[in-house]
Each structure stands twice: as structure tokens, then as C-alpha cells.
Image (cartoon, helix red, strand yellow):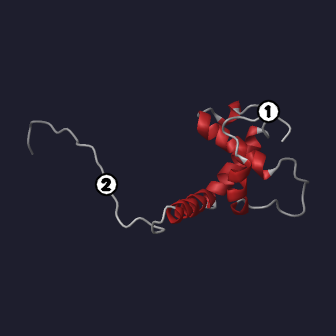
Amino acid sequence: MDRKSYPSDLSDAEWQEIESYIPPPLTGGRPVEHTRREIVNGIRYVLRTGCGWEYLPHDFPPWPTVYDYFRQWSRSGLWEQLNQNLREKVRQKAGRANSPSAAIIDSQSVKTTEKGG
């Protein structure tokens, strides 16, 4: 990484934890210009700050590249799978079952009119 880090950047330990879930570059075609870690850092920056993709700072890979990978990985289910696997690891580490055994559903009350029917 040839830039100053942002608070949203992955630590080395975090990257080691998720690296195996991120698909490697395809063989053939154009050479890889940006590391997968920098692409994930760009995605995290946008999600953490809430800025638009086109406002991604210039020291990240170009925003269309970062956005394209975000969409590809979203459509493939990568983020859901990653979240599920990390949640299970955290629960195991805490001595709990992989999946919760109960859930709480909360709903807001909806105001109704005084008029019936």
C-alpha cells in the first residue's frame, strides 16, 4: 500500500481473516492493477463514510473499479457468506452454538384512525 491509511482500512489481522473469501484475479486478460485488499479497503471506505462511489478519494483504485467488484461480489453472495462465516466463528469463540436458537422480532405500532371499518 503506497498511501497513508484511513480508519476504515483493514488491519493485517482482518485481511488475513477474510482474504480466503475474496476471489483471486482471473487468469489471462489484462494484468492486475490493484490488489484485492485495496479494492476491499475502497469498498469499506464508501460504506463507512456514506459517501457516493464517485467521491472515493483518488488514492484508492478508481471508483468504477471498486464499485464493479462490490456489485460482482454482492451478486455472487460473497458478503452474505463472509458475514455468516465470521458470525459463526465469533459465536464459537464465545462458546456458543454456531447459529442462534432464538430470535426476537420487533415491530412498530401503527397508528390507526379513530374511524372503524
Q: Nearer the viewer, residue 65 or 87?
A: 87
Q: Earlier in the sequence, mark 1 or mark 2?
A: 1
SS label for mark 1: loop
Q: What is the x, y in percent for residue 25?
A: 82, 59
Q: What is the x, y in percent for residue 7?
A: 67, 35
Q: Taking 17 as reference, is 112 left or right?
A: left
Q: Amino acid at mark 2?
A: Ile
Give the label on residue 105, or none: 2
Q: Residues within 10 Å of mark 2 (few under 14, many from 20)?
A: few
From this view, report whether residue 30 is shown above or below residue 61. Answer: below
Q: Nearer the viewer, residue 109 or 6?
A: 6
User: In the image, what residue occupies the spot 9% across and 45% down?
Assistant: 117
Q: Residues within 10 Å of mark 1 (few under 14, many from 20)?
A: few
Query: What is the tally of numbered marks visible in this picture?
Result: 2
Report the residue marked by disc 1. Answer: 4
Q: CA distance from mark 1 to mark 2?
A: 43 Å
For the N terminus, give its image quadrant: top right
Give the label on residue 60, or none: none
Q: Taking 85 as reference, is 101 left or right?
A: left
Q: Amino acid at mark 1?
A: Lys
User: In the image, what residue occupies the spot 34% across and 60% down?
Assistant: 103
From this view, report whether residue 61 is shown above or below residue 16. Answer: above
Q: What is the x, y in percent for residue 39?
A: 75, 46
From this view, report whether residue 95 is shown above or below residue 112. Answer: below
Q: What is the x, y in percent for residue 41?
A: 71, 43
